[in-house]
Amino acid sequence: MSRQDAAVTATHRPWMLPLADSPMIVPGADHRIGLTSRYLTRKGEPWFPVSGELHFTRVPRESWRRRLRAMRNGGVNTVATYLFWNHYQPERDAPPSFEGDRDISAFVDLCAETGLEVVLRIGPWCHGEVRNGGFPDWVQAAGVRHRTDDPAYLALVEPWFAALADHLAAHFQPGGPVIGIQVENELYDQPDHIATLKRMAVAAGMRAPLWMATAWGGAALPEDEVLPMYGGYADGFWTDADAPWDVTFREHFFFRHVWDDPGIGADLRSLATETGPESRSPSTVFPPVTCELGGGMATAYHRRPVLDAEDIAAVANVKLGNGSAWQGYYMFAGGRNPGLGLQESHATGYPNDLPQIDYDFHAPIGAAGQLTRTHALLRQQHAFLAAVGDRLVQMPSTLPDRVPADAFDTETLRWAIRSDGERGFVFVNRRQPHGALGPSVPVVFSIALPGRELTFPDKPIAIPAGTIGRFPFGLQIGRTRLGWATANLLTLLDRPGGGRLAVLAALPGISARIALEEIVVEADPDRVWTHEVGRDAIVVLPADLAEEAWVIDGVLYTSADELDVDDIGVLTWVRNGGPAARFDTEQLRFRTLVPEPGPAAATIDLHVEASRPAVEPPLSYGSSNGRASAPSLERVCAEGSRYDIAISAPFQDHDLEITIDWIGDVAVAEADGSLVSDRFWDGTLWTLPIPAGTGTVTVHVLPLHPQAPIWLHPDARERLSKADGQGVVRAAARSVTARRHLPGATS
């Protein structure tokens, strides 16, 4: 096939509206953070925020630091967190408590120490799969018109806002770590109320450069008062058990310039018979920004979605191609509810039953603190944004001349460009979780830029199934011009004595070809490939090695373990025991980091003893609004099979991660008789944090009736049908407190 016959075409379209300061920003205000109609600024320069949600009241205080460093090292530069009112003031007669795990001020201090900005989502109604959306029971039961300008309701909110403002007063100063405050959440038809809540927060003493509100579902927002924030999930627990993969999920795997998502919160809107205005694109005076790109997905009893890391990365990459000026993930770090009865449930009038304790969310950082493959794949995108995000936000998004016909079109190539007219990136997606996409026909990209037409690569390529691509073109690497590349840009680094280094990541099934000046070169797919042009250089990492890449403080490392960098040097949390290496930008090779003497990684299989069989499960434990209800934890412990897992003496000296492979419906885990967590089975492994000193972990497993009205991922459904029985299959433990420094490097 000729290049002409294989061409897919696009015409670069510049910004249609002039760059302007947002009306939300007060002229002359002393803010580090600014807002224009196209992007945000930090200290006067274009800035690309990457925010990740972490609910600190769902994470033990002693684990905050490590979670935050794992977020920072994963490329997150901003932490978003809900302030769930019922976590602080369960009783009306007692003032809000900010002690222990509820100390917001200490958490914000730690964020600042870690180098992270903060967005506070103050509600007062938050959702977050929390009981009453975060309202304490006494607020929920009050005879007021909730979430409106009813004076009686506002009188309940006012002292809560005052308590927050007082506790956080030191952080609301100019230049402080709090850069944004979100009021309310998923409120669709009360713009005046959102404006009222903002005024109340300001009157209480809260200050931030940015004020925000969620805009999905066609939400009506007060003009010029709040920055509209959007979301996008690859799948969700909030649809019915017998519903197919919803079109509102499908659409996020397509390049388009519509940012609204009518699916998020739709089940709650239907209960309230509340509908927002017709779905719309972002305001012409605000940039397209997100606060809830799904970093995973929670598990409801009736519907248990499981997403691969590639599904999460694909949605994020598509949003970049669509023109995103802010990548915000919900959740980036999972957790556990701080008590029983604090979850969204049928018993509290919600359409879904969630686990009482578990809120792992299959996030990049799990509830036990373990990093998942999602962390690795998003880490690559975030390294890219750290390197070129300030330029990317100044590049408008352009869709190709031919776009898919609808959300069910699996043939038409899905791609988009972001360019300033000279340089830019081609974003490509051939990944979605259901209805797998096959390889494309061989293509070349033909882009009409001002004064020239760019066509690449030099010969047609078929885009393989699963490709998540961002191909650079026209980039200046020091004194060298990179014409184009069929590999993903990972990062840009400085070389000693001058010169620049572009690090690319090869993609499976695509030859990494790079146009430099007048030549085209091809990387060896089986090794770290380098090419020098004077003092500038190109490095291409094989695809599997790119998953182990970390870019921390401008240095490239590789490790399958969790890496961190402190004042002493590089260190690794001992998990997998794999090697770590640092890239030498002068010699253009990785140097192995040699650990100091210390604890070695160790994972042991644990003996699992079945001490009680389960009773025969019923077809259903009841339902609400047509959705299956979960059994109580007491019933799980009374009727489920029981498994005792002994922890050997040497392992009792450390906090542990115990990974349990099991099959069933609902499980409850205890450590020496104390509740640790619960879980709805979805076919994935269950990782539990077990405190040091634990002698026995007990797991109760309630079997799943094969005809129960529950949606399972097809892989889990197949495993269930083939299983000889249900219960704990195996368990393994590894220490997570041990870590080792890696001060030396060898060739």
Image (tube, rainbow, N blue to C red):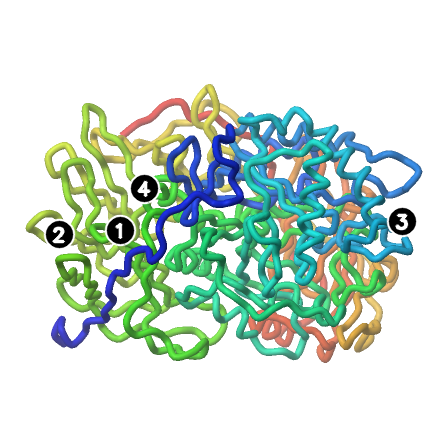
Estimate the x, y position of residue 105 in percent, counting from the top left: 68, 29
* Camera-nearest label, 4 or 2: 4
C-alpha distance separating marks 1 and 4: 19 Å
What is the CA distance from the residue labelled 1 to the residue labelled 2? 26 Å
Q: Which residue is mark 3?
A: 138
* For the residues bearing labels 1 and 2, Cβ distance under 8 angstroms: no
- Please determine whether, in this image, residue 727 is positioned above or below residue 574: below
Disc 1 versus disc 4: nearer the observer: 1
Quadrant, the C terminus: top left
N-terminal of the two: label 1 or label 2?
A: 1
**Dot 1 or dot 3, earlier in sequence:** 3
- Number of residues whose C-alpha sits closer than 10 Å to that of mark 1, classed few (under 14), some (14–19) or many (20 or more): many
Q: Nearer the viewer, mark 3 or mark 2?
A: 3
> Element under label 1?
loop
Identify residue for label 1. 420
Query: What's the residue at 56%, 54% (across, down)?
Result: 292
| Amino acid type for the residue under numbered disc 4 | Thr
**Residue at left offset 43%, top offset 73%:** 436
